[in-house]
Amino acid sequence: MKYTIAVLPGDGIGPEVTNQAKKALDAVAEAYDHIFLYKEAQIGAVSIEGSGNPLPEKTIEICKNADAILFGAIGDVKYDEDPTLRIRPEQGLLKLRKELDLFCNINPSKAYDQLIKNSPLKREIIKGTDIVIYRELSGGSYSGKKELSKDGTVASDVSVYSVAQISRITHLAFKAAQTRRKKVTLIDKSNVLETSRLWRKTVKEIAKSYKKVKVEYLFADNAAKELILMPKKFDIILTDNLYGDLLSDEAAVITGSIGMLASCCIGEEHALFTPVHGTYPKAVGKDIANPLASILSAALMLEHLGLLDEAEAIQKAVEKSLDLGITTQDLKGKNKYAASTSKVGDFIADYILNQEDSNMNFINIHAGQSTII
Ligand code: IPM
Ligand code: MN
């Protein structure tokens, strides 16, 4: 089959890791006889440098016409350090979400056994953690009216939610819970905010039609605490745009697996796949960033396209790289060496095509005995 993939590498380590995901996809294309037609497009700080626009029309068009979107990372310290700059990289992503109506961010956070040693939490607390956050992406303070008074001393971001916006993501969250441990935790500030009270009322109503799913309600401040104290108690977390942003990062980092986590942003018609980590400025250009999250985003994309065996082939290759310790510095496997970003990508692609054969190649290469690859 032939698929058109919009590739938006973006900023920071985005291009380096996305290149490895493309290598994995190329291997899948060869092994399973598919054609992936990549349409590369600009977004973020690099796009501002090039055209003054964080999201050119051309990018929107390419994304709208693609079967799926593979996204890298967005943002640049230059903008982080200067809040007065009016044109900002992040606007590109926010506008893209709006243009494609990507209203639901699905953010998994799983403690991989091999990586628990990287977690800031004790092993017994984190072991077995498996959370998926359903973060609403279209509403809240992200998209409401933004104002700065003429004299620059007062600012506001209006937070708006409608029952329709809350309902569509709530159904997705409950459906997902049915296939997992059957629990949804709604996280809000309904003790303070009107929008949160609407969330709670709407979710309570919808919950009635998912009888087997247990629902729990938590205030966001308490949830931030419980996520660290008892991460295992969470299954599906359902929450709004802003709390979802904060809690996704917290959830990703406590498992010790941030370099491994892939997420997606979906709407009725479009879907975007991206590593959870951001731009990682310190690693840019050094060939040291972990490409596995981006590679797993590609696997998630294949699953979404209905290519389940192909997705599994990538996942198996990733597991193999962990088992053999052919990983970047941040994961430090059993072996003494740390592989570069591109070497990990090469291994994944090679393993997809050659399976067991490639282990020998790689072990030999790292022992300096071979230069076949
Ligand atoms: C994310 C990011 C974005 C957000 C930024 C880059 C606009 O942090 O995808 O979580 O805040 O939504
Ligand atoms: Mn974020």
Image (cartoon, helix red, strand yellow):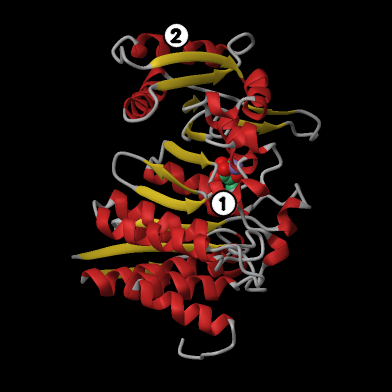
Q: State if disc 2 and disc 1 touch (CB < 8 Å).
A: no
Q: Residue at x 32, y 74 (%)?
A: 353
Q: Residue at x 29, y 44 (%)?
A: 269
* Residue 327, position as x, y percentages in the image: 57, 65
Q: Residue 369, located in which quarter of the rendered image?
A: bottom right
* Residue 238, position as x, y percentages in the image: 48, 25
Q: Is mark 1 within 8 Å of ligand 2?
A: no
In the image, 144 versus 231, the foreground residue is 231
Element type at mark 1: helix
Q: Residue at x 60, y 13 (%)?
A: 193
Q: Is residue 11 above or below residue 191?
A: below
* Residue 120, position as x, y percentages in the image: 71, 41
Q: Earlier in the sequence, mark 1 or mark 2?
A: 1
Q: Which class describes the residues within 10 Å of circle 1: few (<14), some (14-19), or many (20+)?
A: some
Q: Which mark is residue 114?
A: 1
Q: Is residue 303 above or below residue 354?
A: above
Q: Is residue 330 visible?
A: yes
Disc 2 target residue? 201
